[in-house]
């Protein structure tokens, strides 16, 4: 293969893989540990835009999930979040509370239906209702062509990224309908909107999220259901993407008109807007956060 062809495949493929850095649960194959942010959140405003709103977030122990949990708490929301890594979950909960916010961590695995149901039920039991849900948890694996993709990895991607979102909505929606409304934001990816080589399981799982989001918006008009499609976001996962695809950050960002990676807080800002009354007539949409319309 010629060097230009190889570079094209690597760069294009890495672009698709860059969408995977949106996920917040570490892959079982991950060797680079993700850690929660060491920076302290801004002081919470109890009279903020989401005063007394109850927000549920899956996969909020690091990355975009953590940034979003902090942002909601800063705006006065009561945040109930999960993740598989108990030590990081407790760290995030403590940081939010130290800044004057309200947050509760519960360990849960979105692949397990009984754990997802227990998580949603516990949120409502503690805070009395559910106003907003951000189904964010997800995983990735190193790249493989279709014929070389291990079946177990494909199944794990679908079970976590797609089925996990389905389970979240399945148990969140009845509580929201009983309360007369609510907002759901699902984590998709530019890799679910565009096909990229060597990430068939990841791309298929995120495409399923987009489809489920649109279906839910059509089925439940009393709710607002939207998906976000991040591109390359500066989380610990980005290091693994660069390693697995053997590209530098400079190569990775070349297809992006903005010529930079995004920040978790920039994705969190989109989630908060979609959850707010400013987006009161927005449902069934897919919103790219990728610095240039690649999604």
Image (cartoon, rainbow, N blue to C red):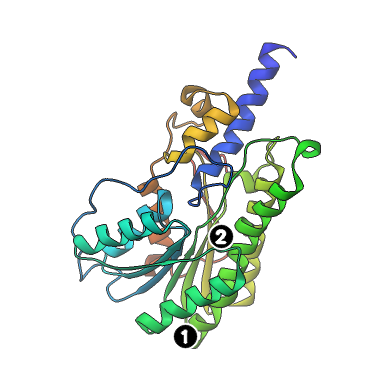
Q: Which residue is label 2 attached to?
A: 285
Mark positioned earlier in the residue sequence (1 or 2): 1
In percent of width and height, residue 262 lies at: 42, 39
| Structural crowding at the residue carrying mark 2, measured as other residues with C-alpha within 10 Å and reported as few (<14), some (14–19) or many (≥20) | some
In percent of width and height, residue 153 lies at: 69, 47
Tell me if label 1 and label 2 are in contact, CB under 8 Å. no
| Count of numbered tags | 2
Tell me if 168 is positioned left or right of 66 in this view.
right
Give the quadrant of residue 16: top right
In percent of width and height, residue 6 lies at: 68, 18
Viewer-nearest residue: 36 or 260: 36
- Residue at disc 2, secondary structure: loop
Q: Which residue is label 1 attached to?
A: 180
The residue most toward the top is: 2
In percent of width and height, residue 108 lies at: 50, 66
| Structural crowding at the residue carrying mark 1, measured as other residues with C-alpha within 10 Å and reported as few (<14), some (14–19) or many (≥20) | few
- Residue at disc 1, secondary structure: loop
């Amino acid at each position: 293969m010629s060097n230009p062809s190889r570079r094209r495949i690597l760069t294009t493929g890495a672009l698709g893989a860059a969408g995977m850095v949106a996920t917040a649960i570490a892959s079982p194959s991950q060797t680079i540990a993700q850690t929660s942010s060491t920076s302290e959140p801004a002081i919470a405003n109890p009279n903020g835009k989401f005063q007394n709103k109850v927000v549920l977030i899956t996969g909020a122990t690091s990355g975009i999930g953590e940034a979003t949990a902090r942002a909601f708490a800063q705006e006065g929301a009561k945040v109930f979040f999960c993740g598989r890594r108990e030590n990081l979950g407790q760290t995030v909960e403590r940081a939010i509370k130290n800044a004057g916010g309200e947050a509760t961590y519960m360990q849960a695995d979105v692949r397990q239906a009984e754990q997802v149901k227990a998580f949603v039920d516990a949120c409502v039991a503690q805070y009395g209702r559910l106003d907003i849900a951000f189904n964010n948890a997800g995983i990735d694996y190193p790249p493989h062509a279709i014929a070389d993709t291990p079946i177990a990895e494909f199944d794990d991607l679908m079970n976590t990224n797609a089925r996990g979102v389905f389970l979240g909505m399945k148990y969140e929606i009845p509580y929201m309908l009983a309360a007369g409304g609510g907002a759901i934001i699902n984590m998709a990816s530019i890799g679910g909107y565009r096909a990229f080589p060597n990430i068939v399981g990841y791309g298929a799982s995120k495409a399923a999220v987009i489809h489920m989001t649109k279906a839910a918006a059509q089925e439940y008009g009393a709710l607002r259901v939207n998906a976000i499609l991040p591109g390359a976001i500066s989380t610990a996962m980005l290091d693994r993407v660069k390693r697995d695809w053997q590209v530098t950050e400079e190569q990775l960002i070349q297809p992006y008109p903005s010529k930079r990676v995004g920040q978790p807080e920039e994705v969190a800002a989109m989630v908060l807007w979609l959850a707010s009354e400013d987006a009161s007539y927005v449902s069934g949409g897919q919103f790219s956060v990728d610095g240039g319309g690649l999604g």
